[in-house]
Image (cartoon, rainbow, N blue to C red):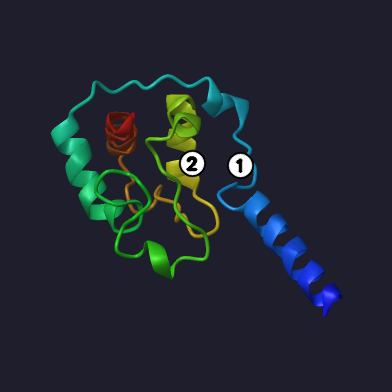
Amino acid sequence: MKHAVLLMLCFFFVASASYGQSKPWPVPDKYKNMKNPVKADLAEGKAIWAKHCQSCHGKTGAGDGTKAAQLDTQPEDLGAATIQKQSDGTLYYKTSEGRDDMPAFKKKIPDEDELWQVVNYIRTFKK
Protein backbone atom coordinates (compact mmCIF):
# COMPACT_ATOMS: atom_id res chain seq x y z
CA MET A 1 0.00 0.00 0.00
CA LYS A 2 2.82 2.42 0.89
CA HIS A 3 4.46 1.71 -2.47
CA ALA A 4 1.26 2.50 -4.34
CA VAL A 5 0.93 5.81 -2.51
CA LEU A 6 4.58 6.66 -3.19
CA LEU A 7 4.17 5.81 -6.87
CA MET A 8 1.08 7.99 -7.09
CA LEU A 9 2.88 10.89 -5.40
CA CYS A 10 5.87 10.54 -7.74
CA PHE A 11 3.56 10.54 -10.75
CA PHE A 12 1.75 13.62 -9.44
CA PHE A 13 4.99 15.58 -8.96
CA VAL A 14 6.40 14.59 -12.35
CA ALA A 15 3.13 15.42 -14.07
CA SER A 16 2.85 18.72 -12.19
CA ALA A 17 6.40 19.71 -13.06
CA SER A 18 5.83 19.21 -16.76
CA TYR A 19 2.31 20.66 -16.94
CA GLY A 20 2.21 23.81 -19.02
CA GLN A 21 5.76 23.42 -20.26
CA SER A 22 6.03 23.00 -23.98
CA LYS A 23 8.88 21.30 -25.73
CA PRO A 24 11.44 23.53 -27.44
CA TRP A 25 10.45 24.77 -30.87
CA PRO A 26 13.63 25.47 -32.84
CA VAL A 27 13.38 28.38 -35.28
CA PRO A 28 15.95 28.95 -38.03
CA ASP A 29 18.08 32.09 -37.56
CA LYS A 30 16.73 33.45 -40.85
CA TYR A 31 13.33 33.81 -39.17
CA LYS A 32 14.49 34.80 -35.69
CA ASN A 33 16.05 37.94 -37.13
CA MET A 34 13.33 38.67 -39.71
CA LYS A 35 11.55 41.99 -39.35
CA ASN A 36 7.84 42.37 -39.98
CA PRO A 37 7.56 44.23 -43.31
CA VAL A 38 3.81 44.88 -43.00
CA LYS A 39 2.20 47.88 -41.33
CA ALA A 40 -0.38 46.66 -38.81
CA ASP A 41 -3.97 46.60 -40.03
CA LEU A 42 -5.64 45.19 -36.93
CA ALA A 43 -9.05 44.87 -38.59
CA GLU A 44 -7.50 42.63 -41.26
CA GLY A 45 -5.49 40.70 -38.67
CA LYS A 46 -8.58 40.18 -36.52
CA ALA A 47 -10.59 38.89 -39.50
CA ILE A 48 -7.86 36.39 -40.43
CA TRP A 49 -7.55 35.41 -36.75
CA ALA A 50 -11.29 34.80 -36.45
CA LYS A 51 -11.30 32.59 -39.54
CA HIS A 52 -8.15 30.53 -38.94
CA CYS A 53 -6.91 30.80 -35.35
CA GLN A 54 -9.72 31.60 -32.93
CA SER A 55 -11.22 28.11 -32.85
CA CYS A 56 -8.14 26.78 -31.05
CA HIS A 57 -6.47 29.84 -29.51
CA GLY A 58 -9.68 31.62 -28.47
CA LYS A 59 -10.94 35.15 -29.01
CA THR A 60 -8.20 36.69 -26.85
CA GLY A 61 -5.40 34.22 -27.63
CA ALA A 62 -5.61 32.55 -24.22
CA GLY A 63 -5.72 29.02 -25.68
CA ASP A 64 -9.37 28.54 -24.79
CA GLY A 65 -10.99 28.21 -28.21
CA THR A 66 -13.89 25.88 -28.88
CA LYS A 67 -11.59 23.21 -30.39
CA ALA A 68 -8.83 23.49 -27.75
CA ALA A 69 -10.16 20.66 -25.58
CA GLN A 70 -10.05 18.26 -28.55
CA LEU A 71 -6.31 18.78 -29.10
CA ASP A 72 -3.53 16.59 -27.74
CA THR A 73 -1.62 19.70 -26.63
CA GLN A 74 -3.07 22.80 -24.99
CA PRO A 75 -2.65 25.86 -27.24
CA GLU A 76 -0.26 28.42 -25.82
CA ASP A 77 -1.54 31.59 -24.17
CA LEU A 78 -0.32 34.02 -26.80
CA GLY A 79 -0.50 36.94 -24.37
CA ALA A 80 2.07 35.33 -22.08
CA ALA A 81 5.43 37.06 -21.78
CA THR A 82 7.21 33.95 -23.10
CA ILE A 83 5.33 34.33 -26.38
CA GLN A 84 5.28 38.11 -26.58
CA LYS A 85 9.06 38.34 -26.14
CA GLN A 86 9.59 36.20 -29.26
CA SER A 87 10.52 38.07 -32.42
CA ASP A 88 7.97 38.77 -35.13
CA GLY A 89 9.94 36.49 -37.42
CA THR A 90 9.73 33.66 -34.90
CA LEU A 91 5.94 34.04 -34.63
CA TYR A 92 5.70 34.21 -38.43
CA TYR A 93 7.71 30.99 -38.77
CA LYS A 94 5.63 29.12 -36.20
CA THR A 95 2.39 30.26 -37.80
CA SER A 96 3.61 29.40 -41.27
CA GLU A 97 5.23 26.03 -40.53
CA GLY A 98 3.22 24.71 -37.58
CA ARG A 99 3.97 21.52 -35.66
CA ASP A 100 2.01 18.81 -33.89
CA ASP A 101 -1.57 20.08 -33.35
CA MET A 102 -0.65 23.52 -34.71
CA PRO A 103 -1.30 23.34 -38.47
CA ALA A 104 1.03 24.91 -41.02
CA PHE A 105 -0.77 27.96 -42.36
CA LYS A 106 1.55 28.61 -45.32
CA LYS A 107 -0.95 26.82 -47.58
CA LYS A 108 -4.16 27.95 -45.84
CA ILE A 109 -2.97 31.56 -45.80
CA PRO A 110 -0.59 31.70 -48.79
CA ASP A 111 -0.43 35.53 -48.83
CA GLU A 112 2.64 36.39 -46.74
CA ASP A 113 1.24 39.82 -45.87
CA GLU A 114 -1.79 38.14 -44.32
CA LEU A 115 0.46 35.90 -42.20
CA TRP A 116 2.28 39.02 -41.03
CA GLN A 117 -1.09 40.57 -40.14
CA VAL A 118 -1.73 37.56 -37.89
CA VAL A 119 1.59 38.31 -36.16
CA ASN A 120 0.54 41.94 -35.78
CA TYR A 121 -2.75 40.82 -34.25
CA ILE A 122 -1.01 38.41 -31.84
CA ARG A 123 0.81 41.48 -30.47
CA THR A 124 -2.53 42.86 -29.25
CA PHE A 125 -2.76 40.02 -26.70
CA LYS A 126 -0.02 41.45 -24.43
CA LYS A 127 -0.92 41.27 -20.77
Viewer-side residue, 1 vs 23: 1
In the image, residue 46 above or below residue 127: below
Viewer-side residue, 51 vs 59: 59
The C terminus lies in quadrant = top left
- Name the side, left or right, on which 89 lies relative to 46: right
- Residue 94 is labelled as 2
Image x and y of residue 86, in percent: 49, 27
- Name the side, left or right, on which 114 lies relative to 20: left
Query: Could you say which quadrant of the image residue 41 lies in?
Result: top left
Viewer-side residue, 60 vs 9: 9
Query: Could you say which quadrant of the image residue 25 lies in?
Result: top right
| Residue at (31% x, 51% y) in the render | 53
- Residue reaching furthest left? 43
In the image, residue 5 above or below residue 120: below
Image x and y of residue 36, in percent: 37, 22
Q: Give, as a three-letter code, the residue at label 2.
A: Lys
Mark 1, residues whose alpha carbon is within 10 Å: few (<14), some, or many (≥20)? few
- Name the side, left or right, on which 75 lies relative to 47: right
In the image, residue 59 above or below residue 11: above
Disc 1 on helix, strand or loop?
loop
- Residue reaching furthest bottom? 1
In the image, residue 40 above or below residue 69: above
Counting residues from the start of the chain, the first of labels 1 and 2 encountered is 1
Where is mark 1, residue-wise?
25
The Cα–Cα distance between marks 1 and 2, rounded to whole angstroms, is 8 Å
